[in-house]
């Protein structure tokens, strides 16, 4: 098995096909964001060099027996950006466009996300190049079990702890946990988070990312003197994060006027009936065609007049091209990396408040941390305890980031990165460079 311990910069990452080029820059984007904050801190060059590389990268090519008896070979990755603060932590995504550069970027963002929230984890991410919607349940299970086995040398409850991400869910985590456990010969619930509750998953974990997004928005709205009851919201992505965020922001009184998914969007200026929309999505697989609204194209929903925009799909959605037309006052990043650095600049000039991914969507990994603690102690918490503690951790992070943003006069993304990088840099200095 090839464990690549080299710390090669993103520019030498291998690009195998043209279809990978689009997201090949993502790690460069992450490094650019890092450098902006490192400049604000005046971070020393040695630490800057260390933190702008990923510590460990594993690429695996593995066979899976399909239902028709044929054998397909899939490519997957697990990247650990930095293990200074503790075991590394981060989700696994199944998507046809996954690249090493993307997984590196997502791993780096996990380091910052955990540090912003003060969690005792470094950052990691995994991905498999596959469209799981084209696979049967049995094939997804086989793929998950073999991928888990391939990355086993570098995961573990004290080493690197996976979780759900795009197109993975509690069932996938149950197979991962079972595969790891069967290989070591005993049950290890702490090897993953986002498990089904019956297997030691945490109450509130499924909703945690969306719930955290809404906690972030309500703190920001209060700061701006906005009454959520008088606001409108638009949500891009209606998966685990977007659908929960839409429901909870509506519970806070905001009118959700548009929602989109990969197939398109639905718009109703009077507000969408979200329960009915969820039922429609379960029935048809998409929000498109929902009778309680007008079907519109997905990207245009981002540009609708609204107060709160929640991009909760994939990276690279808000760019220099569409940023001048965005009309929201608050953008809360439910997804990782939805805003390019160029768009960030435009939003900053236009006075649009961006609640950055490494803070806004950190509710997921925060409750993952709670789940890991519960698994290690074999002592489950109630949903109320989970939600209250999540609220507290999000609020503390919000206050800390806002203070940095105000004193240093920088946008919230840079402020969050400053908080995170200072923390990880301190670990690096205190631990020293081995040997
Ligand atoms: N995939 C989620 C994220 O991007 C959760 C990671 C975790 O819980 O470890 O934050």
Image (spheres, helix red, strand yellow):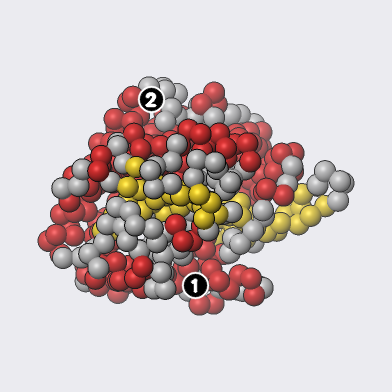
Foreground pick, 366 / 55: 366
* Residue 344 x/y as whole percent: 32, 67
Give the quadrant of residue 99.
Answer: bottom right
Which residue: 15% across, 48% down? 225
Residue 407, how many percent across, how many down?
12, 61
**Residue 63 visible in the displayed image:** yes
Quarter containing the N terminus: bottom right
Q: Callout 1: few (<14), some (14-19), or many (20+) C-alpha neighbours within 10 Å?
A: some
Taking depth in this image into account, of 314 and 307 the one nearest to the observer is 307
Q: Quadrant of residue 271?
A: top left
Q: Residue 383 got which mark?
A: 2
Looking at the rendered structure, the secondary structure element under dot 1 is: loop
Q: Does 30 sit left or right of 224 as displayed?
A: right
Give me the residue at 49% from left, 45% from top: 293
Q: Residue at x 76, y 57 (%)?
A: 73
Badge 1 is on which residue? Answer: 25
Vertical side of 133 occupied by 36: above or below: below
On the picture, is 350 further left or further right than 149? left
Secondary element type, mark 2: helix
Q: Quadrant of residue 323?
A: bottom left
Q: Earlier in the sequence, mark 1 or mark 2?
A: 1
Quadrant for the C terminus in the image:
bottom left
């Amino acid at each position: 098995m090839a464990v690549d311990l080299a710390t090669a910069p993103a520019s030498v990452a291998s690009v195998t096909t043209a279809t990978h080029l689009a997201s090949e820059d993502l790690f460069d984007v992450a490094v650019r964001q890092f450098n902006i904050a490192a400049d604000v801190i005046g971070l020393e060059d040695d630490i800057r060099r260390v933190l702008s590389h990923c510590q460990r990268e594993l690429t695996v090519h593995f066979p899976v027996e399909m239902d028709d008896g044929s054998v397909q070979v899939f490519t997957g990755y697990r990247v650990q950006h930095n293990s200074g603060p503790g075991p590394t932590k981060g989700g696994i995504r199944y998507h046809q466009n996954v690249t090493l550069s993307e997984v590196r970027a997502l791993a780096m963002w996990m380091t910052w996300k955990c540090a912003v929230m003060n969690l005792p984890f470094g950052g990691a991410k995994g991905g498999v190049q596959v469209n799981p919607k084209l696979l049967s349940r049995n094939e997804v299970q086989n793929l998950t079990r073999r991928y888990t086995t391939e990355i086993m040398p570098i995961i573990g409850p004290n080493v690197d702890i996976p979780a759900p991400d795009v197109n993975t869910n509690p069932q996938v985590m149950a197979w991962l946990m079972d595969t790891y456990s069967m290989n070591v010969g005993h049950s290890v619930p702490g090897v993953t988070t986002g498990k089904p509750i019956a297997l030691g998953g945490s109450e509130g974990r499924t909703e945690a990312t969306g719930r955290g997004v809404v906690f972030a928005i309500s703190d920001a709205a209060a700061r701006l003197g906005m009454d959520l009851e008088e606001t409108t919201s638009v949500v891009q992505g209606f998966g685990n994060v977007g659908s929960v965020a839409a429901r909870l922001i509506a519970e806070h009184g905001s009118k959700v006027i548009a929602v989109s998914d990969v197939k398109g969007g639905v718009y109703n200026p009077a507000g969408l009936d979200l329960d009915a929309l969820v039922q429609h999505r379960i029935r048809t697989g998409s929000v498109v065609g929902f009778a309680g609204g007008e079907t519109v194209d997905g990207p245009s929903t981002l540009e609708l007049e609204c107060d709160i925009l929640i991009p909760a799909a994939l990276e690279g959605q808000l760019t220099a091209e569409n940023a001048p037309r965005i009309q929201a006052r608050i953008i809360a990043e439910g997804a990782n990396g939805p805003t390019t650095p160029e768009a960030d600049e435009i939003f900053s000039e236009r006075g649009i408040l961006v609640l950055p991914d490494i803070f806004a969507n950190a509710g997921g990994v925060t409750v993952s941390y709670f789940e890991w603690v519960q698994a290690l102690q074999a002592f489950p918490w109630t949903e109320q305890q989970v939600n209250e503690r999540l609220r507290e951790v999000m609020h503390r992070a919000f206050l800390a980031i806002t203070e940095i943003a105000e004193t240093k006069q920088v946008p919230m993304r840079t402020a969050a990165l400053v908080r995170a990088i200072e923390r990880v840099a301190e670990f690096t200095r205190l631990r020293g460079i081995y040997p």
